[in-house]
């Protein structure tokens, strides 16, 4: 209780509290003192005057200290006042203790703050009220300052920085990165196969991944650089050599194959928004290694037999269509940029805690839950299948092979033959190199 009175008696244990406010009129309480809360956090002290002891209730005296007064000032006031009234030291001490307890109980109670979420949990919580990207860091061997300046004029939350190779530019660009997207390399030219790109792009990817392994090994790594069938195994081997390989965080971006399958089938589905039709594309990311599974489209679609072959071929070799249309002056960049953004967005959303995100992507199957069985069935360790994404990256591989059609099984056989050679080529590039740079 906040209202208590101190009574000094010869018997009963000396100084005692009484909850009875009438103790000031008790014949045994000639030296009683009352301490109770006043308005706005103040403290009131009630004492008896020794004069006219037979009429104590008429001779009580009350002193109040305002709530804005500091505790020490109030306690000194109580001591000084009771001393002048000839109260014993033990009673004065009890009065001060009671005043302190009242002030403590009257203080506004602070709500217990929520524990601050850190690391991956903080990221998951931040997705509710923050943009997906808060910083965009660019790196290239040439032209980065201009691209950085151009992007920095866009009115978005993301802060943009850019670096060249000089002055440890790669290290600065990668510092603190959560997601690393690698589209680096030379584009494919007319008559150039994805294998022709290998000698040029393999070294570029190797050196960039070496930087990732040294600077931000926990980042999600998204490899776009072609040939993906070889560059992803290169990335895996470099990370293994550095002792930081996490299969759940390495992805080959094959989303462009999915985007093409969705778009090219639009004429048959009549779907106004082609992205509403989900078509899993498995295998690899070049030519015959690309296996679109139109039989597993959601919602289901009916493709005439005479149109299925040309449709599959167009998805497999859609890059050639763009190269030819550009007259050899470039390859698929805008559609690839969209596909890369789409997959990157899925990775970030999943990392921040969004559930139910499944994207086909080229991964190291033995390192992903459910992937071991697919690796045994296909005979390759790297393969693109629908992957359930989560805060840790690739959380589960969905095995769609048992339900594919007979036509798709034939496509799969051709895929496995071409894919195995590309994977081995990427692994050998690193294992036979004397040193990664």
Image: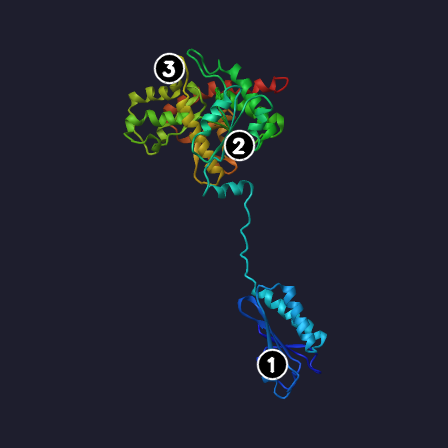
**Is 104 drawn above or below residue 260 in the view shown?**
below
State the image coordinates of residue 368 (x, y, percent, origin top left): 52, 33
Image depth: mark 3 or mark 2 in front: 3
For the point 56% across and 33% down, the residue is 176
Residue for badge 1:
60
Image depth: mark 2 or mark 1 in front: 1
Query: Based on the displayed image, in which of its 4 quarters is residue 288 positioned?
Result: top left
State the image coordinates of residue 76 (x, y, percent, origin top left): 67, 68
Q: In this view, does 103 lie to the left or right of 252?
A: right
Badge 3: residue crowd in 10 Å (few <14, some 14–19, many ≥20):
some
Label 3 to label 2, Cα distance in Å?
35 Å
What SS does tag 3 mark? Answer: loop
Residue for badge 2:
249
Q: Give me the disc on residue 326.
A: 3
**Is 223 drawn above or below residue 369 in the view shown?**
above
Farthest-out residue, bottom: 54
Which comes sooner in the sequence, label 2 or label 1?
1
For the point 32% across and 22% down, the residue is 308
Query: Based on the displayed image, in which of its 4 quarters is residue 400 positioned?
Result: top left
Badge 2: residue crowd in 10 Å (few <14, some 14–19, many ≥20):
many
Q: Quadrant of the C terminus?
A: top right
State the image coordinates of residue 106 (x, y, percent, origin top left): 56, 65
């Amino acid at each position: 209780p906040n209202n208590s009175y101190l009574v000094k008696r010869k018997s009963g244990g000396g100084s005692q509290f009484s909850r009875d406010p009438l103790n000031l009129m008790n014949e045994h309480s000639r030296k009683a003192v009352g301490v109770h809360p006043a308005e706005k956090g103040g403290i009131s002290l009630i004492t008896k005057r020794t004069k006219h002891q037979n009429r104590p209730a008429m001779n009580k005296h009350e002193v109040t200290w305002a709530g804005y007064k500091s505790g020490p000032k109030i306690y000194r006031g109580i001591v000084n006042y009771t001393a002048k009234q000839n109260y014993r030291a033990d009673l004065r001490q009890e009065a001060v203790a009671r005043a302190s307890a009242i002030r403590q109980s009257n203080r506004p109670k602070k709500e217990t703050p929520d524990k601050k979420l850190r690391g991956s949990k903080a990221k998951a919580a931040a997705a509710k009220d923050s943009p997906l990207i808060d910083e965009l860091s660019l790196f290239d061997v040439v032209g980065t300052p201009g691209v950085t300046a151009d992007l920095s004029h866009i009115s978005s939350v993301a802060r943009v920085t850019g670096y060249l190779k000089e002055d440890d530019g790669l290290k600065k660009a990668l510092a603190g990165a959560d997601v690393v997207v690698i589209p680096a390399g030379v584009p494919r030219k007319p008559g150039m196969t994805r294998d022709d790109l290998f000698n040029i792009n393999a070294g570029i990817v190797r050196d960039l991944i070496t930087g990732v392994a040294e600077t931000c090994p926990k980042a999600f790594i998204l490899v776009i650089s072609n040939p993906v069938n070889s560059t992803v195994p290169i990335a895996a081997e470099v990370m293994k050599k550095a002792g930081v390989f996490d299969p759940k965080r390495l992805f080959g971006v094959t989303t462009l194959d999915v985007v093409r399958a969705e778009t090219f089938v639009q004429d048959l589905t009549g779907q106004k928004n082609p992205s509403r039709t989900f078509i899993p594309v498995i295998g690899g990311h070049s030519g015959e290694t690309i296996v679109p599974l139109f039989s597993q489209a959601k919602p289901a679609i009916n493709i005439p037999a005479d149109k299925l072959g040309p449709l599959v071929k167009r998805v497999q070799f859609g890059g050639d269509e763009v190269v030819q249309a550009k007259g050899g002056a470039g390859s698929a960049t805008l559609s690839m940029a969209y596909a890369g953004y789409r997959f990157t967005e899925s990775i970030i959303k999943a990392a921040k805690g969004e559930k139910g995100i499944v994207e086909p992507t080229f991964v190291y199957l033995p390192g992903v839950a459910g992937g071991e069985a697919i690796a045994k069935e296909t005979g390759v360790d790297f393969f693109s299948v629908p992957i359930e994404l989560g805060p840790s990256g690739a959380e589960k591989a969905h095995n769609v092979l048992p339900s594919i059609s007979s036509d798709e099984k034939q496509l799969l056989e051709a895929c496995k033959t071409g894919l195995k050679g590309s994977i081995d080529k990427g692994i050998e590039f690193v294992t036979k190199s004397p040193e990664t740079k």
